[in-house]
Image (cartoon, coloured by chain):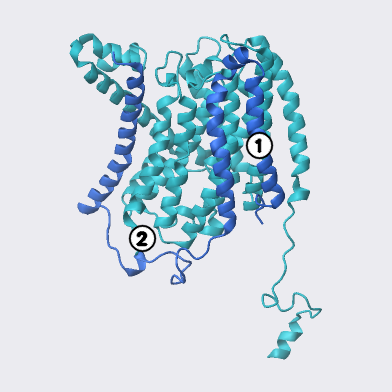
Chain colours: A cyan, B blue
Amino acid sequence: MMEIEILRSGFDFLGIYGFFDGFMPDNLDWLVFLITSVILAMVIINALVISTALLTWFERRMLGRFQSRLGPNRWGPFGLLQPIADLVKLLTKEDTIPEGADKPVFTLAPIVFLVPALIVFAVIPLHGSSFLGRLNIGLIFVIAITSVNTLAIFMAGWSSLNKYAMFGAMRAVAMLVSYEIPMGISVVGVAIAAQTLGLSNVVLAQDIPFILVMPLGFLVFITAASAEMSRTPFDLIESDSELGAGYHTEYSGAKFALLQLTEFMAPVIVAALVTTLFLSGWRGYGPIPGPVWFIIKTFVVLFGFVWIRASWPRLRVDQIMSLAWKGLLPLSIVNLFVIAVEVFIFNPGEAGLSTRDLLIMTGINWSITIIALIVIFNVMGQSKLKRPEPVALPLANMYANTTVSKKATDLAEAD
Amino acid sequence: MLDDYFRHYGLITIFALIAVAIPVGMLLVSTSLSIIGIRPNKPDVVKKSIYECGFETLSKRWSGFNSRFYAIALVFVVFDVEVVFLFPWASEFGYMSSKFGAFVLIEMVVFVAILVVGWLYAYRKGDLEWT
């Protein structure tokens, strides 16, 4: 009964607040606020965790399809209950802590990893009258909160006293820190065009989705963001063939479950961010309500991430670092100043950019994007990134620099 | 109704509290499962040893530290501070440029240009190489 009333009032902070405020005495405003926020936070965080669980199922099924196999299909219809089976298994596994590990930091790292991922949704608007998106520094909040995961990864790697974990964590810090810069600067382009840092207003400013207005910013953002969540083209943090499993080599049981949960939650969060910043969020056409549009767009972006994971091999560490510092950083600065000059020329003042302005910007920016990408490809294409010729150490292979050929007859003589 | 400022940050605080409660609760569930005996908890010497491809651990955790990590960290700090300064400028750029003209744009061009010169210097010096 109560739930139906809340749903009817529009599932929103103000709707729930109004519902409880209706029958609570006036001097208990703080209690009303507390109840409202706890309900909202519980619902959003649980929805996020459940959607992450569904994403793990979806990703494994899709990867199976991409590799012409079935994927998990035994437990529940189409294997839909697989995430629950995984959780039960991980919770009932033994939780070992290696000898000499830094126990408090070892236990704290999964918590520090998960918490920022859960908080991000506190500022993402899901529909037009959303209270959540109206925080006036939403963009800075998102960028600041999501960069805490660097710290958590280093805590995990350092505390487990394992060399593989330590190497994975050091690579992770170098890579995450490098990709944070282009990500931040490409988001600044959005802030200039929308003239605000609040995420609701960013959505309202997108009469034309910003993916069309600033394709260069979108490309830089999505590349940097997929590096930030360390998924497949950029997964050298936990490259299984070199480092065991990277920073979570020593983790098992419930803590491993937390780390994996966060890792799979990152695509959901990035997809929601891309939807808000570049795909015009909850805005859509026809009678379909806003939240449904938001979910559809998020799902399309998520499918794109799975597709990228299925089809691209891992990059080398030097390719990853030079992509960040020599490729994406100049591109993001070009994007920033192109947008700034255009906004300066159109001079929108208080009114914001009109649809006509956005259309002209779209035309200019697409040509600039194509030119900039061609220039960057030519500057740092494959020919400039040749792998250095391997030089054999004298002791590594004694036949390397000699003309002696090792034949089957040599072995026979040796006997 | 409370002040909007307090409502926003109060909501974020409650989000943070619940977000902390969920992983802590999960670890507590795991611990209590081991207490009631559903989850095994029998550590021994081999299980608690550190994974290293079957070897015994040969050297300490801090076996070496390449200086290029330090160079990357330095360049990062410079550019991260730049991003922090860009955000407030960006959100007010539309209003400010209609009031003060080209000055607002040129000022930031100069600021970023100084950093780009530093970036070019690091590039020429080979600090951005990773070989």
The chain ID associated with circle 1 is B
Residue A3 percent across, percent down from the top left: 28, 17
Residue matched to label 2: A101
The chain ID associated with circle 2 is A
Q: Nearer the viewer, residue A358 or A9?
A: A358
Residue A406 percent across, percent down from the top left: 75, 80
Say what secondary structure mark 2 lies in.
Answer: loop
Where is the N terminus of chain A found, in terms of image quarters? Answer: top left
Residue at horizontal 69%, vertical 76%? A397
Q: Of the numbered discs in the image, which one, if any, rests on residue B114?
A: 1
Residue A286 drawn above or below residue B21: above
Residue A121 drawn above or below residue A378: above
Q: What separation in Å lies between label 2 and label 1 (alpha carbons)?
A: 45 Å
Say what secondary structure mark 1 lies in.
Answer: helix
Circles 2 and 1, Cβ within 8 Å, touching? The answer is no
Residue at horizontal 36%, vertical 53%? A106
Residue A63 appearing in the image: no
Residue A107 drawn above or below residue B19: below
- The kind of residue on which mark 2 rests is Ala
Residue at horizontal 62%, vertical 29%? A218
Residue A101 percent across, percent down from the top left: 36, 60
Q: In the image, which is nearer the foreground, mark 2 or mark 1?
A: 1
- The kind of residue on which mark 1 rests is Ile
Residue A120 percent across, percent down from the top left: 43, 31
Instruction: Tell me if B4 is positioned left or right of A272 in this view.
Output: left
Where is the C terminus of chain A found, in terms of image quarters? Answer: bottom right
Q: Nearer the viewer, residue B105 or A390?
A: B105
Tag 2 and tag 1 share a subunit: no
